[in-house]
Image (spheres, rainbow, N blue to C red):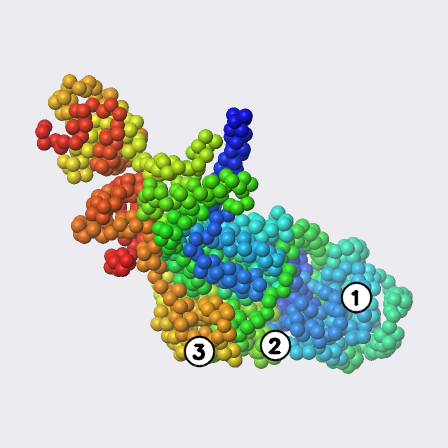
Amino acid sequence: MGIMNTQQQNKIIYSWYGKPTNSDRKLRTLQYKGIIIKSERSRTEKCIQLGDFVLIEGENADQPFVAQLLDFYEDGAQQKHAVVQWFSHITEIPQNKRKLLKREVSPQEVFFDQVSGYDNDIAVETIIESVLVIPLHPKEELPITLNKEKIFYVKQSWDGKCFKALSTDTFSKLKDANKKGDETKKVARSVMKTKNVEVEIESKHSASKSSLSKERYSQRVANGTKTPTARKKLQLNSMYMAIFCPFGFECSVFRASSFLGSLSSGNTVFLATLFKLWASRSAYSLLKTHAISVSYSLLNMIDSSQEEDFLSSSDGLYSSSSEEEDNDVFCTPEKKTKAGRIFSTPKSSRKPSVHTPAKTLKKTPLPGTPKTPRNATPEIPRRSHAAQKPASMLEEARLRLHVSAIPKSLPCREEEFQDIYNFVESKLIDGTGGCMYISGVPGTGKTATVHEVIRCLQQAAENDDVPAFEFIEINGMKLTDPHQAYVQILELLTGQKVTATHAATLLAKLFCTPGPKRKTTVLIVDELDLLWTRKQNVMYNLFDWPTQKHSKLIILAIANTMDLPERIMMNRVASRLGLTRMSFQPYTYKQLQQIISSRLNSVKAFEEDAIQLVSRKVAALSGDARRCLDICRRATEICEFASQKSTPEIVRMAHVTEAIDEMFSSPYINAIRNASLHEQIFLKAILAEFRRAGVEEATVQQVYHQHISLCRMEGMQSPTVSEIMAICSRLGACRLLLVESSNKYLHMRVRLNISQDDVMYALKDE
Amino acid sequence: MSKRKSKESISTNGECISQVQKLLRERLCHHYATGKLFGTEHQYRHLLELLKRTTVHGESNSALIIGPRGSGKTALLNHVLKDLMEIKQVRENLLEVRLNGLLQTNDKVALKEITRQLRLENVVGDKVFGSFAENLAFLLEALRKGNRTSSCPVLFILDEFDLFVHHKNQTLLYNLFDISQSAQTPVTVIGLTCRQDILELLEKRVKSRFSHRQIYVINSFDFKQYVRIFKEQLSLPAEFPDETFAQKWNNNVQLLSVDKTVQDVLQNLFHYTKDLRSLHLLLMLAVSNVTVHHPLITASDLQEASKQYRMDSKANIVHGLSVLEICLIIAMKHLNDVYEGEPFNFQMVYNEFQKFIQRKAHCMYNFEKPVVMKAFEHLLQLELVKPIERPSVRTQREYLLMKLLLDNNQIMDALQVYPNCPTDVKQWATSSLSWL
């Protein structure tokens, strides 16, 4: 539905119904009591009033939100807003809380949402259509309905922590809201019987007895020429509705009452039939008696010609706080009749019927097309033998020292952790958005710390210390193209799979329009520098969204270089990124030491000095924790290897030194020493040629001559040119030499890839 | 009687010879599959332990095997894998993905190949792989879902690892190494490369994720061991059907290994390269000479093979040239000497040639210029001379600047063995132009 709405977006016109009911000069807002949604494509319009239940476009197109309209207003900027009361689908409730229900919940059931923190101010443009929400008592079963789409039931409320039965207050309020149901619908469907019948009765009685209503009534009858067609249309509607959308809510009380009025002059007859109908279908005697008593009291009351009396008593009856528009309807009939008539015109009643089929027709082909099968989630086959548990202390240590092992806590990053945590937490609590730029050389724990923060925040959210939020993560290196970032974000947010450009527009819409009931989103952008494009629009958008008023987007951008914003970003991008920055310094040797010790914890596999040696060595080189752990891991292997026969040993200095040498020693010297004799002579010849020419570059021909003279000196057989070429290319492949492409043959130029001193050192020792 | 006996022996010999040929050719051509490892015991242990831990404990790892061409990197890896596969627990627990930088020239192709080799494409049917992005997301998702203890470990073998480094952003390497350093499906990434500077090519993020295990494979044996390898490569195994023949053959090999000429041949080759592939090539040439009438390898066979092997390719071409073309090459040689390697053009060569003709007109027919031009162009086609710039429409062919791709030594050596070369031409080649 959401998809369709976006496609038709420009074709739907939202306009206020009626004149502003109330205006606030200070806030410069104008309040209204209804909105007319006109769709140009299907040439229909429908009216939604306060108190109606509606579907509201959410980020997930398949799952629109359910809400009740509480207020309409237009702000100073002529933006149309609505204030709503939310209802939650079961899918919106966190997984871990669903257990509290201890029962299966049908997708038709929603929960009265009392979670604080949701923005209940939405843009009217997000309203899709009206639906029906019916309150049920907790014990009641969900009735089986003909059409499952447009009707929801509410049994319990949800306040973010636990489920509660609906308070009588809410229950009756919801009940009242349903009273506006159309009679025709009632006939078509058996579900909403009780409440709606009451409404009908009520309105009918009021119409028949009170003088004002009578006036309106007669007016209606006078217009009788129109009513039959209206009725026909209605019947037609009901047919359509039964098929497509049986609970379109467009029909107003007025139309219903006028319809009833025109149906028969003998109200009692109709009433009786209605009661019969209802009584035969109603299974709940309690409700029945309740309803009957209501209707009797109504009859009694209506005898009194005072409208106000009726209102107050009805208020009392329905435990007060009935909706305002109901009051409007009943207490100011004179004024409203006109409006009411507009409502009851066949045109307006027709529109749902025309509109709905169009929608459904549209909708049916949609689901199949854009969605790639979601079930395509493959898996690496399982192993057939269980993985062995670490048997020895060294193996245990190795397991703990693996980079992938997630430590219980991240030592040495407490400050950074706290800063990031505070930043995100404050934004979460404020319900605003923001960016933070985190830099640091590889292996300094940036991503790990951020993940730790998120883990802690998720924990806090579960304990209701901070508002719930959504966490998604993208990694520049895991994208094939910067624009794929949009696709991934959208897919992680809503599960939709669309193209990059479409995803960009959808996301922009999502973040830039006042979103209904959206949780704050925390987005981690790892390896930010790879999102660079020539126009930088990906980065621009990413950092622009959090600045939007309604985005509720918190971005934690991670990259390697501290001056990335200054170096590669355009001013407008850098400016949006803001100045909240943090840089992770490379670990010092003490920190590295602490990291290793905390990982090893109680496993005594390392000598204290050995750990210190590793830490100092790595800290001096790069401060990369990964390197540090890798060396330690390698040292355990060497230790294990060395002490295979003897008793288990712990890792000592010697092992660590060997591991360090293995990883950091330059391979060139060894490669030269193990080269064949002619290869070594060739290197000598190069040195000689360099010395002769005074330039650090020579052609193979020149080196060849030197080579021959060297061979003569040593009394060796000199190689042919082909052999020299082969030697040269071999050395070039190892990158001991840098050589040009070989098609120049003898005129190919050669350079050394290592310093002359190294070559001399390597050759001299022999 | 004796005739028949000899015939029989010939026929049995024939069988033996064909078996010897088959056995040795197989050994020499597919050297890595069957061959033994020489001087890499330490590396073997290291790699074996590494892969065993991957399969048995589900530990993720990454390593690079670095060594010059022909040093036995692939042989080492194959050997380790072969031995590993004999352990049942390993055999059933390891998925292998082999990529080659020469075949998977970009990440898109590589990803498709990985998916294919992991047999994931049948899981999703044929419709998924629309785009590279989807493919990557799909594969990462697949690998992310696993964990250390329950998923089957995957061994990625990246041959010609240095070529993967040039893929855009090093996306594939980053992701592989990242998986190997995070708690996902256990993977071990083994890269094979001959470049000693490979670590400098890795992007810093990729480098940080690489575990820095480098296994250097170097031909560290000396000449004695080289001779022993030579013996082992030629010897027939004990299970050879005809024992007497095998005995004879092996004795002969033993004799060869102490023969002076053979030692010289081997020494030369050893000095030239320690690469065992060249030894195999030499032996292959020698083994091909074995026939029924020549059942054992002789020292001269090896010498011949060595000569064939060490032939200079350009000098070889010179042998097949006409006298006129030889003359042109000599003229170019002199030009090179005079102008110290500066480029020349056809006109200069022609003038030089004319000078020679004028002096020694009696021994050479004075060819017309177009004929000389034709000869010159033939040299051009043989790539004995090479234009230093691309021929353009504007410059005339005669004035296109050229360089000679032969060294003086090569020319002189070639002339030494050139059949029927006129003496005057030889003289001209040796003497500089001072007498002109």
Q: Horizontal placement of A614 versus A225: left or right? A: left
* Residue type indicated by callout 2: Glu
Please identify the quarter of the rendering in which residue A344 is found. Answer: bottom right
Chain under disc 1: A
**Residue drawn at point x = 32 percent, y = 55 percent:** A672
**Residue drawn at point x = 43 percent, y = 79 percent:** A608
Front residue (pair B11, A20) = B11
Point out residue A761 in the picture as x, y percentages from the top left corner.
26, 60
What residue is pinned by disc 1?
A257
Point out residue B153 in the picture as x, y percentages from the top left corner.
57, 60
What residue is pinned by disc 2?
A462
Chain under disc 3: A
Gap between marks 3 and 1, in whole Å?
A: 91 Å
Front residue (pair B106, A102) = B106
Asked if residue B77 shows in the view, the reply is: yes
**Vertical placement of residue B279 versus A32, above or below:** above
Label 3 crowd (10 A; few <14 / some 14-19 / many >=20) = some
Gap between marks 3 and 2, in whole Å?
A: 42 Å
* Total numbered labels placed on residues in the image: 3
